[in-house]
Amino acid sequence: MGALSKRAIAAALMEQSITLFACPVCQQSMHVYEQGRLVCPANHSFDIAKQGYVNMLTHSAASKYSKSLFESRKAVIDSGIYDAVEEKISKLIASAKTVLDTGCGEGSHLARIMTDIDNGIGVGIDIAKEGILAATRHYPQQIWCVGDLAKSPFAQESFDAILNILSPANYEEFKRLLAPDGCLVKVVPQSGYLQELRAQLYADSSKETYSNEQIVARFKDSFSEVIVERVTYTLPLAEELVPALLEMTPMGWHKKEETAIVLNEITIDVDLLVGKV
């Protein structure tokens, strides 16, 4: 017997965790049909692609994120500069059995975090198909979905932990999806995040400094139980990673061509906002 296809592997993972899913059109339960698609009782159907992901978008969605951006993001994350952040998240959600990463991109954070969680299943969702394609290519042991949280393909109270790492939030949907006693971990930049890059790109402008006060305040307004933990450190940055870092962060997208960026080290400075309903 030959090796299972990526579609068959993904279908088996989805079938094992089928109670996590709900039809994004009518919110009814889903089932896996002939290892090829997710179908609800109203016959709304979503194909499992041969690459091993399911596209559950109910509308067309343009993404500004390219394949090369996700390759750059993976290279930077694989270099280990976020290791301490990922380790902290793993400890915070150590007992979770179902983990959703919202805005997962190419899936590197989720895949690395799940290696420290025993018997857990990770699900990544992103509106950018290029990111999900990269995720399925590198991390077939997790479930990957192209989808929009505004039309969520997941069932109510289905996740023990939700991750929202340096990406936009949908707090009402997060609260709907959290299981009782589940938690949301949102990672937001602190004032020193990538400060070496910020200093060169935005020297002598208002953007050279950054505050997350408004984001933190809104988070605290959205959850009754909140913990804020800061993770900050500076570490060497390999010269070959500088272009990748510039491509993956919105700061780098506005760099003028003539601006030369020289970085020997980089600071990671983030707040981990942990919320329970």
Image: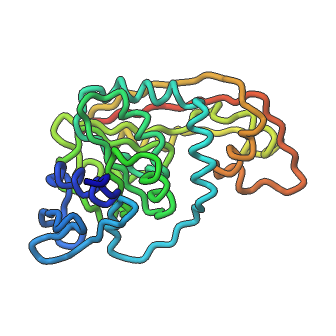
Let me know if residue 172 appears in the view: no
Q: In this picture, is 48 found above or below 238?
A: below
- Position of 175 compared to 81: left or right? left
In percent of the image, x 19 and y 52: which residue is there? Answer: 20
Q: Nearest the camera: 103 or 276?
A: 103
- Position of 120 compared to 71: left or right? left
x and y percent of residue 74 in the render? 57, 44
- Position of 79 compared to 145: left or right? right
x and y percent of residue 200 in the render? 81, 40
Q: Nearest the camera: 74 or 90?
A: 74
x and y percent of residue 88 in the render? 43, 24
In percent of the image, x 24 and y 40: which residue is there? Answer: 98
Q: Nearest the camera: 27 or 107?
A: 107
In percent of the image, x 28 and y 53: which residue is there? Answer: 9
In the rendered view of the protein, which quadrant contains the C terminus? top left
In percent of the image, x 46 and y 64: which residue is there? Answer: 129
